[in-house]
Amino acid sequence: MREDSPSSADRAAEARPEIVWERVDRRVRRALVWSLPLILLFALAILPYMASAYTVTLTFLVFFWVATAQSWNLFSGYTGYVNFGYVGLIGVGAYTTAILIGKFGAHWLLAVGAAGAVTAAFGFLIGIPFLRAHGIYFAIAMLGLAEGLRVLFSMDLMAPLTGGGAGIGFISGMSLAAKYYAMGLVALLSTAVVFLVANSRFGLQLLTIREDELAAQVMGINTTSKKLMAFTLCAFLTGLAGGLYAAYVNYLVPATMFVTAYYTLIPIVMATFGGLGTTMGPVVGAVLFTIISEAIWARFVFLHLVIFGAVLIIIILFMPQGIIPWLQDRRILPRTRWL
Amino acid sequence: MTQANHVLLRVGTIVAGYGLKEVLHGVSLHLRSREIVAVIGPNGAGKSTVLKTVMGYLKPRSGEILFDNRDITGREPHELVWLGISFVSQGRVIFPDMTVQEHLDMGAWTLPARKRAEAYEKVYNLFPRLAERKGQKAGTMSGGERQMLSLARALVIEPRLLILDEPSLGLSPKFVDQVFEKIVEINQLGVSVLMVEQNAARALQSSHRGYVLELGENRFEGPSHALLADEQVRRLYLGGRRGLAPEGCLSP
Amino acid sequence: MDRVDFLFSPYGSELTAAVASVIEELGVPTAASIVATLAPWKGKNAKWMTQFSSTAPLYLMGSVDLAIERAEAKNIAILYEDTPFPIGVADGLRARAKERGLKIAMDEKYDKALTDWSPLVSKARSLGAEFLAGGGYYPAAVGITRAAAGIGYRLKLLALVVGAADPKFVKDLGILAEGVAGSDIWLPSVKTRGFVVEGATIANEDFVRSYKEEFKRDPEYWSAAGYGAGQLLAQAVNDSLKRARKVDRNLTRDFLFNFSGETIYGDYGVVKLGQPDAGMQVRKQHFVIQWQKGKKEVVWPRELASAEPWIGWPR
Amino acid sequence: MADLLTFIEFSLRGLMVGAVYALMAMGLSLIFGVMRVVNVAHGEFLMLGGYVSFFAWSSVQLNPIASLFVAMPLLFFLGMTIQRLFIERVVGKPELSSLMLCFGLSIILLQGAQLLFTPDPRGFTWLLYPVRLLGWNFPMYMLMIFATSMAIAFALFLFLKATRWGKAIRAVSQNYEVAQACGIDARKVRMLSFGCGAAMAGAAGAFVPVQFSLSPGVGHEFILKSFAVVVVGGLGSLWGAFLAGLLLGIVESLITFYFSSHLAQLTFYATIIAVLLVRPGGLFGSAEA
């Protein structure tokens, strides 16, 4: 549990203004705050024309992890309900795109949009019963759901659409640059949504649920509908990311699409490392971990996941609030709602 | 063991709370050997928090707790049992799936094996109804029976100090009487008792001295009969009831 | 990837399937060396990647012939894991059984999370199957063999992919492995003519000899596949150099799609460019192997056999 | 008649597989009961038990029953150590902490095993011959595993029922504060229970290389099945886990035989979901939650 609520944190920051960041000259700070994001955006925008296909693909993957870490954060980071079946939502999004393009010849734009909508609808429908289960029961139920979807998608019943266990292949018709920009937009959208939620009444209500759901109910918050809204929103963004990811993979097999130890673990670690319930935490986590991952992946295939596991444990035990609030507590970063 | 006037427990200005919320702002009390001390006060006064802090379930932020002149501040609850302190928590939720005998086995945790049989014998003599139901599971017993079982469990070690948190909560009037009679009976066997009670009048009637807490601070203290007779205490904490004659009180 | 002229493909069906589209988009000539699925080629109109290895349906086809001609089995039970490669193997078994008129007593796939095969093996027995074929990966080969032994199932022939060809199989199962048939794509002992490169012929035995000198052990099939694909690509590059005096992607690609011949790995030949399944392997053969006295023997096709097939399992 | 016999045969077969599920789920339930922690890394304890048994067999030909005497103590101490170092710090914290901590442990143990033991599947053959029992052929090893599992399960029940520390475990799981007020050191009890839970998973794991196939990832299938088992049995209820383990073993075997293995797997996951949504406390267990 985070001991400092945002309001008390703000007050603490006012009382002791010796934050490292604030020692920097005011004009320099303002210039940095405006120019850095713009430079970054510009660099990312021209990347496909400047860099190698490898770099573009890697950045595409960073976008994918930003989008998924943000989406996971949006629901689980804010409500405290651990979504262990996250890969199920990615899978539904990915399959929607694959089926629409592969079986019905839809344009990728339509297919990816539909992936968001279908996954949102799916999230809404399963959210109604699933969110009745609390705490650990929700976590276990979601784990069961993801594995159940894997089996369901390989069954004969679904084979006309999903291709069963043999999988479904398709040609997305997207160039690498198109995939890159589209995923970049989804990452940006996810971050924007989390930012808006973080700074709204809705976000505060979600945090109240995380701290004490019973108290939230007593305060008159309809916790069920708030959780459902957050879950549906999370599903929508995940669906978009999953749909575009399908266009990158081009070939979906249930056995390799629904891998909990990968597609659920990684967004969780990234979001938790950056800071659950923060706006920029998942972004920091995703960028950092993709780089670490890429650096050690080639030489130590198994070690790279060991490190993910170890980081998760260290964070939970020693800085459960994540890196951004940790830096804020140490007065290195300012307490601003932009983070 | 110890002489009659010896101070067994001394709680010195403890400050304690949960999370950011401070509940006790410096509560002090003491208890002499063979005394029954009642702590009363309105809801939210921090009565139960005092007991939780004494028992070590909650660590005080400041202040000290001495038992038999030994500093026990911040000790773990299970360590206190070895010193001869027994605690009966509020609400009588004990071990629903364990039998009466198993409760006593657990109560005898700190006793050496050779002393247990004798200890069980004594407790069953004190609570004959439990002796008849050694094999019954606690979950199937009535509220009053469970309260007796809780007391029995706490008495197996023949404690020097028995701490009771709301012993009459939720019991029918018939059982309330029984419980308080039992407490006095236990006290007469030589056990000092510290209890927190919602039923202030009844608690003062069955105790030697009393403390009144309000909003986490000491408000009144003194011999129980004096508190019962005090106009202000009666108005504020005893529902203004008259006729609660101090005659029924235990002599200090 | 932007400045390469040709590629060896990654290991495994799913990885290859995933990179196939990238290869097609970038236009890099590729010989996919270890991939048994048809998915990257079937109906895909591939223009850059050819299949150097063989296809899943070919894996156990030979065992159907063996079961009919030597074991005189009247029917077959096909039992396979529900993932791309085993599905392909089962497709081959099914097609060959129909073609040869072998009755299909059971045709069932199982989920990859299955841990106990005995209900399915018992079902095959209750349906009177004499020839049990299929499988998935290593755990399935061991699991199915164990389950069959555990219920005392007597079969005329038991043929399983891929695990049954693994040397561990005989170590883990001991006597039970005796007589179990499997499929192998390449063995050090198989004779090939090999390529003529710059006047010298490098045949399979030459490859095996040099490998042994270098690494002090027998090469595994993936080493041979890699080497064979290397031979093929080297030839393609030579061809391009001969014609255009430079390494030209289009010329290299044309060679990969048009060449039909042999490398140390065995036959190579793919569906020609422009046809629906372009790039798909059509010539590479599989051998039926069988564990006999702790040794892996080739028992089918007859002309390559190193030993007579044993009929009846368990021994 | 033949149909009925087949039905009984496959029920018995399922019962034998279910015994292994029961062992594992009992450990999971024990840990949950005492410290309200869902040990997501439980499958990895099973996997480690499997490797102990495998190496005991391949190095000194120790049979799986004998290797239990190595696997169980080893897992017991490993469990106690992990509890002391990691789990103890999140007891009583929000479940997000304990769930993610265990998830991290699970990944480390899994990937560590891949580094250490390689991802190769392993197994060995032990007592693999059919024995006639009640008119059916059962593999000898299955009968032995069934009998041993039952013995271990009942040993655990006996330990909890009749020994001082066993009763302390029950006391702490039923009322942690009162147990402390009896003088019981709850931290020691939590260590002990986590050790016992891990040892149960290790015992179940010792049979994996004989009955199934052993690889570092084997825990994943079993943990999911165990979740179904404990959810049906009621988290925290040992009898519930025991009975539900056997029951789901039977159900799995029957559905695999009569329908398909896909449907059998789906049944596990659908069961988890259905039970949690209808009765969050489990079917057999008390409606605690």
Image (spheres, helix red, strand yellow):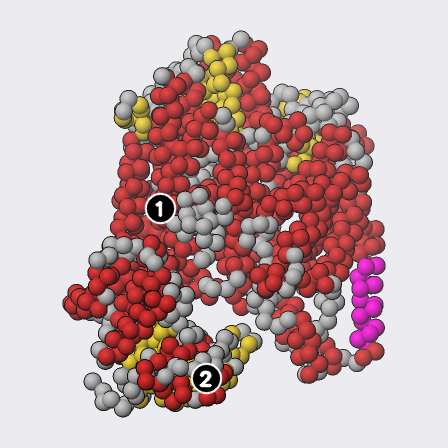
| Residue plotted at (37% across, 67% down) | B173
**Residue A166 position within the rendered picture, expressed as x and y whole percent measured from the top left:** 61, 30
Q: Chain of mark 2?
A: B
| Residue plotted at (35% across, 51% down) | D199
**D70 vs A333: above or below:** above
Q: Secondary structure at mark 2?
A: helix
**A92 vs C149: above or below:** below
Task: Specify the label residue D239 is tagged with.
Answer: 1
Label 2 Cα crowd, 10 Å radius (few <14 / some 14-19 / many 20+): some
| Residue plotted at (80% across, 71% down) | A32
Amino acid at the residue labelled 1: Trp
The residue to which callout 2 is attached is B234
Q: Work out whether residue D36 or residue A152 is closer to the camera in this orientation and state it.
A: D36
Q: Chain of mark 1?
A: D
**Residue D259 position within the rendered picture, expressed as x and y whole percent measured from the top left:** 49, 25
> Would residue C137 be found to the left or right of residue A171 on screen?
left
Q: Is residue C28 visible?
A: no
Q: Work out whether residue B48 or residue B167 is closer to the camera in this orientation and state it.
A: B167
The dominant secondary structure in magenta is helix
Q: Work out whether residue B110 or residue D258 is closer to the camera in this orientation and state it.
A: B110
Q: Work out whether residue B93 or residue A113 is closer to the camera in this orientation and state it.
A: B93
Residue A38 falls inside the magenta stretch: yes
**Residue D214 position within the rendered picture, expressed as x and y whole percent measured from the top left:** 42, 41
Q: Secondary structure at mark 1?
A: helix
> Would residue B21 be found to the left or right of residue A51 on screen?
left
Q: Which residues are magenta?
A: A28-42
Measured in 3D between alpha carbons, the distance from the residue under mark 2 to the one under mark 1, in whole angstroms, is: 54 Å
| Residue plotted at (55% across, 22% down) | C90
